[in-house]
Image (cartoon, helix red, strand yellow):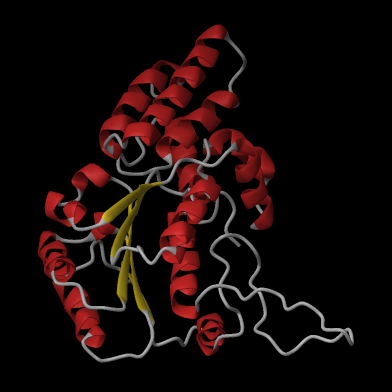
């Protein structure tokens, strides 16, 4: 269930209703705020069509058979469509996700070419490709996707997830509609964490990014906390560094210096989210801010 991004959902629903939805859309913003989930929600709406209105009862108090409505929201799909059942079963031939394969560090050209070959086949319904994420594409893979975006085929939609927009080829950006997603509110973050069985209290560390303190990210954060506590530098490319530093400082005896460092880290994280600062550079700055308060001092 998608929580948050109400304005973005309304904007996308308006484009769909007006028949102006682009063939390629870049969903960009900080990690862990639900970009992939929004892409999946949008893909379902594109493939299945809009939710059908509930029929009014006739004079006898009965209603004709009608498609069921979705779960609500501007992007609610037609849950009575055959494709909806296929999507729920993970067997819809019109839905494709391109992401990092197990053991790989990037999405290579062969992976892209294999998907594009599938898309050459004809289809009677809309087809959607989610790329999660553009940040993981090799240069060759990105250029191959660019060629497809330059000559879009009717009925095929690309939903491109992106964490660092400045790193995306300008030529790809110019051929896509851009939609920036902001971090969630504290209340939305707590709601997300609660819905996935995580402690809502972690919202104070999440900074509107529940994905940064849950699942694999939670494990990475604890590993980073352990590294910091033992005087070892955590990986600079890890999005868990700032949350781990904040968690580590929060566990220290209270002092003005610790409180100031915590506040500086929180502000740094907000700025990183606002303008997509490079992760490694941001983490280096964060470690410098907190250095005097760690075991590494």
Q: Is residue 152 visible?
A: yes
The percent coordinates of residue 29 (x first, y second) are 38, 45
The percent coordinates of residue 284 (x first, y second) are 29, 29
291 left or right of 252 in image: left
Q: Quadrant of the N terminus?
A: bottom right
Camera-nearest residue between 37 and 219: 37
Camera-nearest residue between 129 and 224: 129
179 left or right of 148 in image: right
The percent coordinates of residue 80 (x first, y second) are 61, 84
The single residue placed furthest to the right in the displayed view is: 60
Residue at 79 percent of width and 85 percent of height: 63
Q: How many marks?
A: 0
Residue at 20 percent of width and 72 percent of height: 152
Q: Is residue 232 visible?
A: no
Q: Based on the displayed image, in which of its 4 quarters is residue 119 positioned? A: bottom left
Look at the picture and state if 89 lies above or below 216. below
113 left or right of 251 in image: left
The single residue placed furthest to the top in the displayed view is: 256
Residue at 32 percent of width and 33 percent of height: 275
Look at the picture and state if 9 lies above or below 59. above
Camera-nearest residue between 15 and 39: 15
Q: Based on the displayed image, in which of its 4 quarters is residue 224 positioned? A: top left
Look at the picture and state if 177 lies above or below 209. below
The single residue placed furthest to the front in the displayed view is: 59
Look at the picture and state if 183 lies above or below 140. above
The percent coordinates of residue 31 (x first, y second) are 41, 47
Q: Quadrant of the C terminus?
A: top left
Residue at 26 percent of width and 67 percent of height: 104
């Amino acid at each position: 269930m998608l929580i948050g991004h109400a304005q973005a959902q309304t904007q996308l629903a308006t484009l769909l209703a007006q028949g102006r939805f682009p063939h390629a859309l870049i969903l960009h913003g900080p990690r862990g705020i639900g970009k992939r989930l929004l892409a999946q929600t949008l893909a379902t709406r594109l493939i299945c069509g809009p939710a059908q209105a509930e029929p009014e009862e006739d004079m006898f108090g009965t209603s004709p058979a009608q498609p069921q409505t979705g779960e609500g929201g501007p992007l609610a799909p037609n849950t009575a469509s055959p494709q909806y059942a296929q999507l729920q079963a993970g067997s819809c031939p019109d839905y494709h996700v391109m992401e990092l394969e197990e053991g790989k560090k990037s999405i290579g050209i062969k992976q892209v070419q294999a998907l594009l070959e599938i898309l050459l086949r004809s289809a009677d319904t809309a087809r959607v490709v989610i790329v999660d994420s553009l940040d993981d594409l090799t240069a060759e893979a990105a250029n191959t996707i660019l060629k497809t975006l330059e000559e879009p085929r009717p009925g095929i939609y690309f939903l491109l997830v992106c964490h660092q927009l400045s790193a995306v080829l300008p030529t790809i950006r110019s051929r896509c509609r851009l939609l920036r997603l902001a971090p969630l509110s504290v209340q939305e973050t707590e709601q997300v964490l609660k819905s996935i069985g995580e402690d809502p209290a972690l919202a104070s560390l999440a900074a509107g990014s529940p994905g940064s303190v849950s699942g694999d990210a939670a494990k990475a954060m604890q590993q980073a906390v352990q590294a910091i506590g033992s005087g070892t530098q955590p990986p600079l490319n890890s999005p868990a560094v700032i949350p781990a530093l904040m968690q580590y400082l929060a566990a220290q005896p209270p002092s003005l210096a610790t409180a100031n460092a915590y506040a500086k880290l929180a502000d740094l994280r907000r700025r990183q989210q606002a303008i997509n600062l490079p992760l490694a550079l941001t983490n280096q700055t964060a470690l410098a801010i907190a250095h005097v308060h760690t075991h590494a001092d």
